Amino acid sequence: MTTQSENMRLRPRGHWTMTDEQYRETWLTRVRAYTEINESGCWLWRGTVNHKGYGITYYRGRGQNCVHRLMYMVTHGVELAREQFVCHTCDTPRCVNPVHLWVGTTTDNQRDRKAKGRNFFANKTHCKRGHPFSPDNTRMSPFVDRNGTLVNRRVCIACEKLRSQWPHYMERNRAYQRERKRRLRAERFAKQAESRT
């Protein structure tokens, strides 16, 4: 008995019977039909886009892949690792022109963004409550982002003071202090009992 995925693989029609080279040519033709060229030379994807504005499509029946990433892999004949990003020199998410694409890491992408002045958080001058990010009102707080990378972020000191006065924060802080005192007392008693023996 064969499973559904085996049945799909065994079907004698469509892209399952094409060689890799034939499928690449067919896919490139389809992509070119879904693009329009603007004055800056970008090939703008007119098909479906994801929530970040990048074009998405299917390739060999596999899920929704970013078109610019597939375009780079198909035109350069490489297989990219998950941690490798395909970045745009033109900074247009819908662009799939292979000349405008380059491979880099998350760090490379962030450096490029910062060099071009597109870093949203670095360009902010005030916090969400309107306090200025001045040297006397800002501190750097390290935290771990989604990728597990340790990064620094700016924290508004005025907002921190406001938050510390809210009742649920005060109660949580009191509970933490009570637990800390109880733990220190238990450690002290354990040391005293150990020194007596």
Image (cartoon, grey):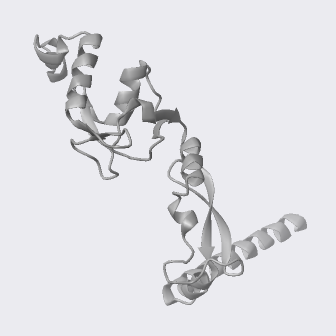
Q: Nearer the viewer, residue 111 or 18?
A: 111
Identity of the residue drawn at 70% across and 79% down: 181
Please give the name of the residue rendered at 17% of the width and 10% of the height, measured from the top-left corner.
Answer: 17
Q: Is residue 117 left or right of residue 178?
A: left
Residue 163 image point, x, y percent = 54, 84
In the rendered image, which quarter is residue 187 located in? bottom right
Quadrant occupied by the N terminus: top left
**Up-down relation of residue 134 to residue 70 (above or below):** below
180 sits left or right of 90 in the view? right
Is residue 60 visible to the viewer in this orientation of the structure?
no
Q: Position of residue 79 (x, y in %)?
A: 43, 22
Rendered location of residue 11, percent (x, y): 11, 13
Residue 107 falls in image quadrant: top right
Left or right of residue 6: residue 185: right
Nearest the viewer among 197 and 75 is 75
Q: Is residue 85 above or below residue 14?
A: below
**Residue occupying image coordinates x 55% and y 66%:** 123
The answer to whether residue 153 shows anywhere in this view is yes
Residue pictured at 10% horizontal, 13% vertical: 13
Task: Report the quarter where the C terminus lies.
Answer: bottom right
Total labels: the figure holds 0
- Pinpoint residue 125: horizontal percent, then vertical percent: 57, 74
Q: Residue furthest front?
A: 39
Residue 95 location, quadrant: top left
Out of 39 and 42, give the one closest to the viewer: 39
Look at the picture and state if 135 lies above or below 4.
Answer: below
